[in-house]
């Protein structure tokens, strides 16, 4: 028996021997490739530290995506800084790496992606780590569809701001998912997304109790959507809403009438909505827009009659901006201001060609308007008589902005701010007004010597060293001074401004394209006022 056993031993040894070629083949094979994703993900769960997970994520794209799916289960408690991914830096791999890194740096709170090749794969990879996400901005992302955005929505209950710009593949499915899974959404901006339709907007506006600001541009919006906005007043009575429509079409006077009855609308912007004309305001016989505080009309085909109806109906309107409303005249504007005398605080006119001439037959009224801010930009017909007429109606101006008014001189400007000393004038901008000189600067100093914080004289060639001397002596509280393209300012004024800055609070000074200043003087004041934001 011993002999038999001794003979059997070599045979057992021969059975365990392998040829060199077989051993080499076994060493080259990756056994992890044979495992399904679920098994490999279960193994990766047991990695002891975030550092080990980040190291393993560099093994392959498959390991990176699997670890990204596990990120939401073990993310750090710290708040990661906002992430801005643009161009070539924005890829699916980068988003997956962000998800893995959240286990160490904390979950992302803000993600901004633009002009990239990011697809649904990247958004799906980052979505498990988005439970603390409050801001998501996607612009010029042609490869992102509903699949990726819905994955984000399902994992982002704290999302409060969403911006989508030029995302052509996203449809109403995403809007429905957002309305279902993002109850904390407060602001939404939808720009140039052609696949959004009326049903998607209705689902979005009918839910989301915290929604306060809506901005839609380049997309058709129907009467049903405006009705859904109006219905929010009954469904969420404590929430106020701001609505901005730019270059939008599809709604009619009927839908606008429903919107006007909304008791929760605080701010309304209608920019480049070509369908808006007098017919939209024809039904204004009683009160409309009961809680509206701010109204912006840009490129609207409205006349004095529509503006009059609006001013009589929206009795609580505080801010009115008219941009390129060429059919509104001075008479209609003054009548509207009179109707809103107890509420209007801010008036802005931009490129309104029919506004500006003197109002015929106007009677002098007592100073009873509440206007605090007046801005008139590039209105070619605005003259001194118009400003004098407006100045007789205001007494507490705090902000005056006149830009590109060639027909305005010192006389009209001085008449506009003559009574502003009662309100404490704080900001004055006189840019590209060729008729402004030292007399206007003297009027500003007389009215707002103790209260003025900002003075801009960009392109006012009539301002000289004498005007700046008045500013230096009496406006010690000035914080920002803009003297760009003031050609008659010399080096002598800079020495005075240096003394003023040392004694006061001046922190912003612009000396751009001032031909009368030498480079040495500008460099010297830059060294002396090292804390000042100097633009030269």
Image (cartoon, rainbow, N blue to C red):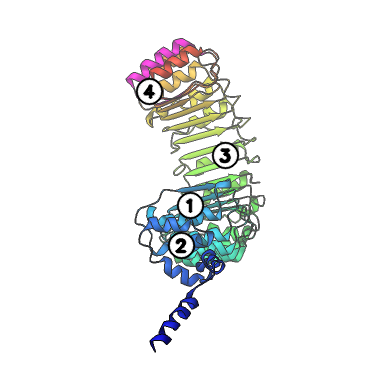
| Mark nearer the N terminus (2 vs 1) | 2
| Mark nearer the N terminus (4 vs 1) | 1
Q: Which residue is mark 3?
A: 333
User: Does residue 455 lie above or below 493 as drawn?
Assistant: below
Q: Given this view, does label 4 or label 1 mark the residue nearer the observer?
A: 1
Q: Which residue is mark 1?
A: 111
Q: Which residue is mark 4?
A: 449
On the question of residue 439 being in view, the answer is yes
Quick one: SS at disc 1?
strand
Pick the front one: 444 or 47: 47
Distance from disc 4 to disc 3, alpha carbons, whole Å, reads: 31 Å
> Mark 2–mark 4 contact, CB under 8 Å?
no
- Magenta includes 503? yes
User: Does residue 438 lie above or below 243 as drawn?
Assistant: above
Whole-percent x, y for residue 381 in the image = 63, 30
Q: Given this view, does label 1 or label 3 mark the residue nearer the observer?
A: 1
Distance from disc 4 to disc 1, alpha carbons, whole Å, reads: 46 Å
User: Does residue 1 lie above or below 243 as drawn?
Assistant: below
| Mark nearer the N terminus (2 vs 4) | 2
Whole-percent x, y for residue 287 in the image = 51, 55
Q: Which residue is mark 2?
A: 67
Distance from disc 3 to disc 2, alpha carbons, whole Å, reads: 63 Å
Quick one: SS at disc 2?
helix
- The quarter in which the N terminus is drawn is bottom left
Which residues fall within the magenta stretch? 488-509
Quick one: label 2, few (<14), some, or many (20+) residues within 10 Å? many
- Residue located at (61% from left, 32% from top): 379
Q: Judge left or right: residue 211 versus residue 384.
A: left
Q: Judge left or right: residue 46 versus residue 298.
A: left
On the question of residue 397 being in view, the answer is no
| Mark nearer the N terminus (4 vs 3) | 3
Q: Given this view, does label 3 or label 2 mark the residue nearer the observer?
A: 2
């Amino acid at each position: 028996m011993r002999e038999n056993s001794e003979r059997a031993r070599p045979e057992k040894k021969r059975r365990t021997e392998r040829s060199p070629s077989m051993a080499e083949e076994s060493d080259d094979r990756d056994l992890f490739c044979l495992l399904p994703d679920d098994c490999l993900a279960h193994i990766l769960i047991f990695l002891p530290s975030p550092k080990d997970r980040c190291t393993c994520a560099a093994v392959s794209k498959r390991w990176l995506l699997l670890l990204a799916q596990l990120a939401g289960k073990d993310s750090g408690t710290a708040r990661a800084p906002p992430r801005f991914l643009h161009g070539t830096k924005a890829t699916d791999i980068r988003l997956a790496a962000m998800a893995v890194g959240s286990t160490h740096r904390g979950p992302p709170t803000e993600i901004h992606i633009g002009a990239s090749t990011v697809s649904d794969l990247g958004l799906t990879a980052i979505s498990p780590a988005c439970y603390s996400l409050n801001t998501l901005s996607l612009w010029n992302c042609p490869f992102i569809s509903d699949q990726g955005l819905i994955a984000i929505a399902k994992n982002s209950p704290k999302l409060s701001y969403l911006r989508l710009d030029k995302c052509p593949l996203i449809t109403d499915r995403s809007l429905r998912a957002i309305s279902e899974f993002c109850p904390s959404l407060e602001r939404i901006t939808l720009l140039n997304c052609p696949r959004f339709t009326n049903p998607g907007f209705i689902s979005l506006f009918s839910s989301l109790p915290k929604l306060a600001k809506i901005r839609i541009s380049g997309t058709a919006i129907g009467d049903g959507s405006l009705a859904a906005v109006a219905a929010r007043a009954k469904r969420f009575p404590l929430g106020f809403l701001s609505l901005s429509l730019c270059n939008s079409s599809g709604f009619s006077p009927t839908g606008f009438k429903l919107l006007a009855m909304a008791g929760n609308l605080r701010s309304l912007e209608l920019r480049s909505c070509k369908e808006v004309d007098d017919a939209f305001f024809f039904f204004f016989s009683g009160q409309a827009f009961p809680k509206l505080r701010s109204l912006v009309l840009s490129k609207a085909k409205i006349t004095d009659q529509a503006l009059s109806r609006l001013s009589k109906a929206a009795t609580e309107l505080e801010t009115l901006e008219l941009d390129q409303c060429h059919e509104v005249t001075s008479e209609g504007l003054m009548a509207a201001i009179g109707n809103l005398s107890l509420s209007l605080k801010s008036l802005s006119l931009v490129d309104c060609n029919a506004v500006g001439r003197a109002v015929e037959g106007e009677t002098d009224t007592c100073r009873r308007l509440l206007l605090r801010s007046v801005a008139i930009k590039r209105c070619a017909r605005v003259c001194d008589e118009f400003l004098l007429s407006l100045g007789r109606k205001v007494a507490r101006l705090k902000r005056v902005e006149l830009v590109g008014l060639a027909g305005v001189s010192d006389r009209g400007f001085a008449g506009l701010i003559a009574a502003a000393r009662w309100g404490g004038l704080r900001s004055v901008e006189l840019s590209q007004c060729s008729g402004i000189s030292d007399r206007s600067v003297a009027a500003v100093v007389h009215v707002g010597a103790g209260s003025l914080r900002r003075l801009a004289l960009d392109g006012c060639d009539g301002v000289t060293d004498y005007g700046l001397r008045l500013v230096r002596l009496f406006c010690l509280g000035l914080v920002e001074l803009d003297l760009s393209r003031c050609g008659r300012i010399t080096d002598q004024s800079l020495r005075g401004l240096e003394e003023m800055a040392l004694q006061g609070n001046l922190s912003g000074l612009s000396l751009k394209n001032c031909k009368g200043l030498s480079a040495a003087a500008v460099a010297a004041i830059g060294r002396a006022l090292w804390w000042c934001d100097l633009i030269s």
